[in-house]
Image (cartoon, rainbow, N blue to C red):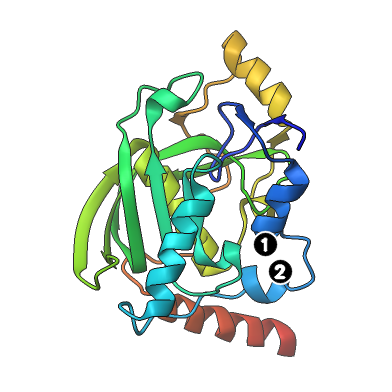
Amino acid sequence: MIKCIIQIVTIFYITSFTMSYSIAEIKNVFVQYSDKNAKKIFYTPSKQVSEINSPYIQELIVQMKEKMDGVGIGLSANQLGHPIQLFIIEYIDDKREPRLNMQDIPFQVFINPKITKASKEKISFWHGCLSALDKPKGKIATYKWIEYEAFDHKGNLKKGKLEGMGSIIFQHEFWHLLGYLYINHAKEFLESDILQSKVKSGNIQLYKPASKEDPFLLADYVIGESIEQYASRYYVAKKKNITS
């Protein structure tokens, strides 16, 4: 098997991983935006999980963790072909180059999540995705911090606050559950090698206050609403567009 340098992470690109996988092999693991079933998987709001402790959900969480290790820092269930409200995150700063000096994020599971509060400040960041491997990285604005409610892998309700990288990862994966990819929202794109070069030279900061020109990832989401409530608005708006 040919080894290659793969410049990917689920949220963004900041490092290269030397791995015994080809890009084609990784594409076979994660549903890609260009796949035939992508519209059904990615572009409709995900369904609520009702049986968190079921073997199906518990086995899926294990599979997601195994497939994300070494290639990403966040993964939503629909990236494996399961359009349900479930995603995982994990971030270890010292495995990234260049380092962002961000707080490490331990492995966490979020089921049926919603954002309950968010900062006024927004952060600009370059996003990438395991489901858009052939696409350049895109610059997107997200909330600087968020507070959330979700269920963990045992079915316990949890509430918390995420800042820095944790906030970015959460919002990116939450965006997947709402029915979108970053490539549908970003306006400015850079190939991974060019972005890496500009970051190393200091011409680009990966993490900085957003400008008014940076497209805001969750502009259509109302803080405090569930994905079901968002979906209801989504389908009403879609019906109006069709009939108008």
Q: Please give the name of the residue rendered at 59% of the width and 33% of the height, measured from the top-left corner.
A: 13
Front disc: 2 or 1: 1
Q: Which mark is residue 31?
A: 1
Q: Is residue 219 above or below residue 236?
A: above
Decide which of 65, 152 is in the foreground and name it.
Answer: 65
- Could you tell me how far apart the alpha carbons at marks 2 and 1 are, in whole angstroms? 7 Å
Q: Please give the name of the residue rendered at 61% of the width and 47% of the height, measured from the top-left corner.
A: 129
Q: Which mark is residue 38?
A: 2
Decide which of 92, 215 is in the foreground and name it.
Answer: 92
Residue 83: percent from the left, percent from the top?
55, 74
Q: Are marks 2 and 1 in contact (CB under 8 Å)?
A: yes
Image quadrant containing the C terminus: bottom right
Drawn side of residue 50 relative to residue 211, left or right: left
Residue 105: percent from the left, percent from the top?
32, 40
Residue 99: percent from the left, percent from the top?
44, 20
Decide which of 213, 168 is in the foreground and name it.
Answer: 168
Q: Quadrant of residue 114?
A: bottom left
Sequence-first tag of 2 and 1: 1
Tell me if I can see residue 173 in this picture: no
Image quadrant containing the N terminus: top right
